[in-house]
Image (cartoon, helix red, strand yellow):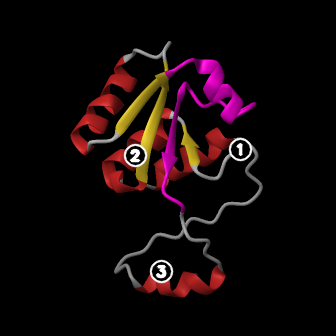
Amino acid sequence: MRDDLIYGIHVIQRLLEIKPQQILEIFVAKSREDKQIQNILLLCRQCNITVHTLARKKIDLWLPSLNHQGIAARIRPQPLLNEQHLTELLQQHSNPLLLILDGLQDPHNLGACLRTAD
């Protein structure tokens, strides 16, 4: 999997809502024309983010064996952080929430945990 790609309806929609400047461009499978995708496309227009429509097989090549739901986004590179940055990050927020997870194997479980915590 490429480091500069994120995928999935909920992940991309949430990033568009909270940090659209992180998204460089969106790739949507031609077969996706449902309401969820239309909402994402509307957010892209509002944020002036380029959307490319392409064959689902192209996204499959980028994200093999992953349930990308027919949508991916290229994002700005993110700095790598480690445990030394944790104290600094926690001090930047007045009421931080720290979610510690171990042994997750299904990406849907991680997404569900993050959405529940949010």
Q: Say which amino acid is labelled 2.
A: Arg
Residue with the most extreme left position: 46
Vertical comparison of 51 with 101: above or below: above
Residue identifier under label 2? 14
Residue identifier under label 3? 89
Secondary structure of the residue carrying numbered label 3: helix
Instruction: Point out residue 113 in the picture as x, y percentages from the top left corner.
Output: 56, 50
State which tag comes first along the sequence, 2 or 3.
2
Quadrant, the C terminus: bottom left
| Circle 1/circle 3 CB separation < 8 Å | no
Q: Using the numbered discs, state the Cα–Cα distance from disc 2 to disc 3 in whole angstroms.
A: 21 Å
Question: Mark 2 or 1, which is nearer the eye?
Answer: 1
Q: Is residue 110 magenta?
A: no
Q: Residues in magenta? A: 54-77
Q: Residue at x 56, y 71 (%)?
A: 79
Q: Using the numbered discs, state the Cα–Cα distance from disc 2 to disc 1 in whole angstroms.
A: 21 Å
Rendering quarter of residue 42: top left
Quadrant, the N terminus: top right
Q: Nearer the viewer, residue 3 or 115?
A: 3
Rate crowding at label 1 as few (under 14), some (14 to 19) or many (20 or more) other CA atoms within 10 Å.
few
Q: Say which amino acid is labelled 1.
A: Met
**Seen in the image, is 110 located left or right of residue 49?**
right
Vertical comparison of 1 with 42: above or below: below
Q: Say which amino acid is labelled 3.
A: Leu
Secondary structure of the residue carrying numbered label 2: helix
Rendering quarter of residue 61: top right
Question: Mark 1 or 3, which is nearer the eye?
Answer: 1
Q: Residue at x 47, y 81 (%)?
A: 90
Instruction: Point out residue 96 in the picture as x, y percentages from the top left corner.
Output: 42, 74
Residue identifier under label 1? 1
